[in-house]
């Protein structure tokens, strides 16, 4: 019975090995530590040697370009010591050089497997988008700065109420574009960083944010109600989250005196941080996209990126973000984060 099970398992593995869409090769290391091909699946043969038999062939000679042999030798030494490998590598295919996500594992003293996932197009697309985004951000920021400067000059020389009303509308839109550029730049910076989680007292986050926001929004009332002993599992980017929420609560507030209350309460395992305001409330379409994963469209993406930034960062801490619209008006954004010892 045991022999039958082992035979069936071997057949299942062989079927899986052969049908995997990514190139996979089984190899053994010779006395010099060089990998020699024992078996290769159909995808490997199609990509690297469609018209050749590869069994018994030195793997590095077949697929590793000469200027990448030192890198491959490092991987081989790691394999010989039973260590796994994972890296973006350049390999020679039948259609020229391509970039692969390479994963190598050792399964015996001198044997191992290597899997190659072609990421050439994905990496090229990301590089092109990166260049496009940087050019667009640079040009947009420069143009908006010029428009903002010319608007200030226009306000100084125009002596007509109708014209001033039009200029004020333009100024509001320019301010929105400036804010959007700032938020987009912040998002690009923070989402590329991996969180380094630690215990952080909430007051160390809230105090500098509220002080800065009070100086920026002198027409608003910003209040904090948070016990000193509350701490959460996060990193210093939580400051960006709170600042984005307060900025959103004030900037889109139509009340004569915008009011924002930042408060915190704690359970045994979580801390709930709330940012409440007396504004017109967050549109339902934007709430649905943020909290229910709805489709993003030009009509539903919202007026800014601050809430998106808050959601992304909060979820990177393993937390959650919810939005409440009280019956008496305003909105409340609630963050739930893991509680930590202060």
Image (spheres, grey):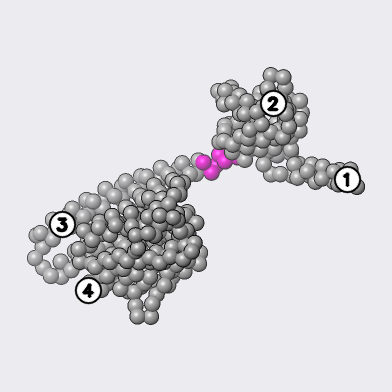
The range drawn in magenta is: 118-123
Callout 4: helix, strand or loop? loop
The residue where tag 4 is placed is 256
Residue plotted at (34% across, 64% down): 226
The span from disc 1 to disc 4 (Cα, nearest Å) is 80 Å
Q: Residues within 10 Å of mark 2 (few under 14, many from 20)?
A: many
Query: In the current view of this chain or complex, which residue is farthest to the right?
Result: 1
User: What label does residue 281 carry, if any?
Assistant: none
Q: For this rendering, which residue is in front, 202 or 48? A: 202
The span from disc 3 to disc 1 (Cα, nearest Å) is 84 Å
Residue plotted at (57% across, 23% down): 70
The span from disc 3 to disc 2 (Cα, nearest Å) is 69 Å
Point out the tag, 4 or 2, that comes first from the N-terminus.
2
Left or right side of 30 for 332: left
User: What label does residue 152 carry, if any?
Assistant: 3
Residue 111 in the magenta stretch? The answer is no
Residue 89, quarter of the rendered image: top right
> Which x, y percent locates residue 333?
39, 67
* 282 to 341, vertically: above or below: below
Residue plotted at (72% across, 22% down): 30
Residue 210, quarter of the rendered image: bottom left
The residue where tag 1 is placed is 2
> Which x, y percent locates residue 211?
25, 58
Q: For this rendering, which residue is in front, 182 or 203? A: 203
């Amino acid at each position: 019975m045991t022999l039958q099970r082992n035979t069936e398992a071997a057949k299942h593995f062989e079927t899986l090995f052969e049908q995997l869409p990514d190139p996979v090769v089984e190899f053994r290391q010779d006395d010099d530590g060089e990998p020699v091909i024992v078996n290769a699946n159909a995808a490997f043969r199609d990509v690297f040697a469609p018209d050749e038999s590869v069994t018994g062939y030195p793997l590095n000679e077949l697929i590793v370009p000469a200027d990448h042999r030192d890198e491959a030798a490092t991987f081989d030494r790691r394999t010989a010591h039973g260590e796994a490998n994972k890296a973006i590598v350049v390999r020679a295919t039948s259609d020229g050089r391509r970039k692969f996500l390479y994963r190598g594992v050792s399964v015996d003293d001198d044997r191992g497997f290597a899997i190659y996932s072609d990421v050439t197009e994905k990496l090229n697309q990301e590089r092109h988008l990166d260049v496009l985004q940087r050019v667009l951000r640079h040009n947009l920021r420069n143009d908006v700065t010029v428009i903002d400067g010319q608007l200030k000059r226009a306000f100084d020389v125009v002596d007509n109420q109708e014209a001033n009303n039009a200029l004020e509308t333009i100024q509001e839109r320019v301010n929105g574009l400036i804010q959007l550029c700032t938020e987009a730049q912040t998002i690009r910076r923070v989402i590329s960083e991996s969180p380094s989680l630690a215990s952080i007292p909430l007051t160390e986050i809230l105090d500098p944010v509220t002080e800065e926001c009070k100086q920026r929004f002198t027409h608003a009332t910003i209040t904090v109600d948070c016990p000193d002993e509350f701490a959460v599992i996060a990193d210093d980017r939580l400051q960006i989250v709170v600042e984005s929420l307060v900025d959103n609560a004030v900037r889109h507030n139509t009340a004569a005196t915008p009011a924002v209350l930042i408060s915190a309460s704690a359970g045994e395992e979580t801390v709930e941080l709330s940012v409440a305001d007396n504004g017109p409330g967050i549109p339902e379409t934007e709430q649905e996209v943020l909290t229910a994963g709805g489709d993003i469209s030009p009509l539903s993406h919202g007026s800014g990126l601050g809430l998106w930034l808050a959601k992304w960062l909060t979820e990177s801490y393993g937390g959650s973000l919810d939005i409440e619209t009280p019956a008496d008006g305003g909105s409340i954004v609630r963050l739930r984060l893991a509680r930590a010892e202060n």
